[in-house]
Amino acid sequence: MRMVRTGIERAYDSDLRQIVARSVSNRLRALRVGIGVTAVLQSSTATALMVASFCAHGLMATAPALAVMLGADVGTTLVAQVLSFDVFFLSPGLIAVGFVVHSMAERTRPRQLGRAALGLGLMLLALKLIVATSEPLRESEVLREVLGSMVGERTIAVLVAALLTWLAHSSLAVVLLIMAFAHAGTVPMDLAFALVLGANLGGTLAPILATLAEGAVARRVTFGNAAFKLIGVAAVLPAIDVVQPAIAWLGADATRQVVNFHTAFNLAIAVVFIGFTGLAAKLAERLLPVKPAADDPGRPKHLERASLTSPPVALAAAAREALRVGDVVESMLKDTIKALKEDDGGLAHEIMVRDDTVDRLYEAIKLYVTEISRHELDSEEGRRATQILTFTTDLEHIGDIIENLMELAGKKSEQGVRFSEDGLAELEALHAKVAANMKLALVVFMSGDERMALRLLQEKREVVELERADAARHLARLREGRRESIETSALHMDVLRDLKRIHSHIVAVAYPVLAQAGLLEPKPPTDKET
């Protein structure tokens, strides 16, 4: 099931997100979109995390989001309906075709569709094996006693199924398992219905846990949907004996009864609560108010755990956070020359505090990209993940070098020395060129533009030549015996060296872009210039 979901997500992720984002016009349209998208993804959890992310970013209000979730719950039952029929004969063909397409296709979309077909074929095979394997369970005394103990304890059955669903992270998988047991005669029908109710309730736990750290706005969606399910379970559980004859009228086969009850339950919830999504949204906003966030610059703004299920979206979020780190480093670099020139101790301290922000954001991005890498990534996604990690590592190194420059500024202030006018002008010119190229590097990172990457590489040669010329002019002033040059000689050379090191890390972002385009042999960035 995960192969099917991730294959569809990676093939049509942006399209599905646009469809969901446009469903805010009215509740009925949102309901239909929820049904359709979840029927394709085969996971209401994936839909819930997508919708919660939209709400957290202000792209969707809580009321239409709850309507989408009502549709999502119905959408999962449609998949169960299809899989309840005898379609096992499709399994070998789907596995064979899916494997060939996934292995041989070069483009992302066909490759991921092959992945989905392979996953669907394995699902059908697994269901066939479950049905066949569960036949002997009818004679199992242990299972009979375990299930028999729950026959008169429907509440316990609901809780057991809810726990199993949370462990499986899929209500559809558990419902299909219940269908297999019912088909084998392992569980009586009233107990099967109670277990289905538990599977529906347990299906709300994974989205709730996934959005606990995403803020109150995102939690309103998952908690609101769970409230709908809880009310539905509480209403239907005591009435199972009344509902069962009506479900049996739709089809006497045990498998059909289980899947029809599953569909009827979610349809009933959708019909009953679609008119109350506005009221539920207001109640959720009152119970889960948005607390004013503390202005902590070291706290990531874009690294949402809900996005981890979709590597392209998660990588885009990591890139946005990396760009934010770049902005902080750029501001540090911009103020560096002022702190050196004016002996501004307060500014130097503030720059060093900003370096702590860079360190915290770097650690957060590193852990986040590591989480992304645990998913199966295609070659382009793997390349982007590596580029993000490399770029943020270079930014973190630049922050450390700037911190070292601020220590030099402190020494300069303590010694009461000042650069010569010529020396200061040279440092300012070199600093201005490095700062300008910092802006260019941020553009190269986000755009991957080959021409700008080549330009950045050319700037590297010019900065190296400029640094050498500045060092030579400084040595000439020393030979002339200029007092200011002699007093600041070590400091001057250290600043030149550190600015060159900073520029080396800045230029490193161009290498993977040029290597990908075949314009450069891949090589790691280095501080040592030749």
Image: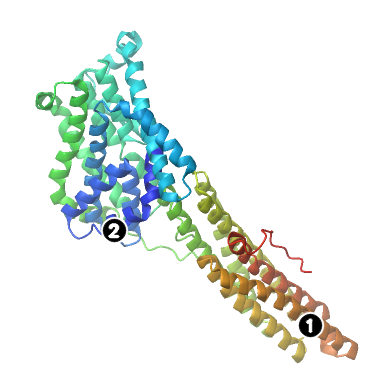
Label 1 environment density (alpha carbons within 10 Å; few <14, some 14–19, many ≥20): few
Image quarter of residue 433: bottom right
- Badge 2 amino acid: Ala
Pointer 2 residue: 21
* Point 24% across, 27% down: residue: 85
**x%, y% of residue 147?**
29, 16
**Nearer-the-camera pick, 53 or 111:** 111
Image quarter of residue 395: bottom right
**Mark 1 / mark 2, whichever is N-terminal:** 2
Check the image and report above or below for 107 versus 188. below
* Point 69% across, 59% down: residue: 523
Tell me, for residue 469, which label it has, or none: 1
Position of 416 compared to 170: left or right?
A: right
Instruction: Check whether the beta carbons of the residues at disc 1 and disc 2 lie within 8 A of each other.
Output: no
Q: Secondary structure at mark 2?
A: helix
Q: Secondary structure at mark 1?
A: helix
Quadrant of the snapshot with the C terminus: bottom right
**Nearer-the-camera pick, 30 or 403:** 30
**x%, y% of residue 467?**
75, 78
* Point 60% across, 73% down: residue: 438
* Point 90% across, 87% down: residue: 479
Image quarter of residue 326: bottom right
**x%, y% of residue 441?**
58, 70
One can see residue 168 in this view: no
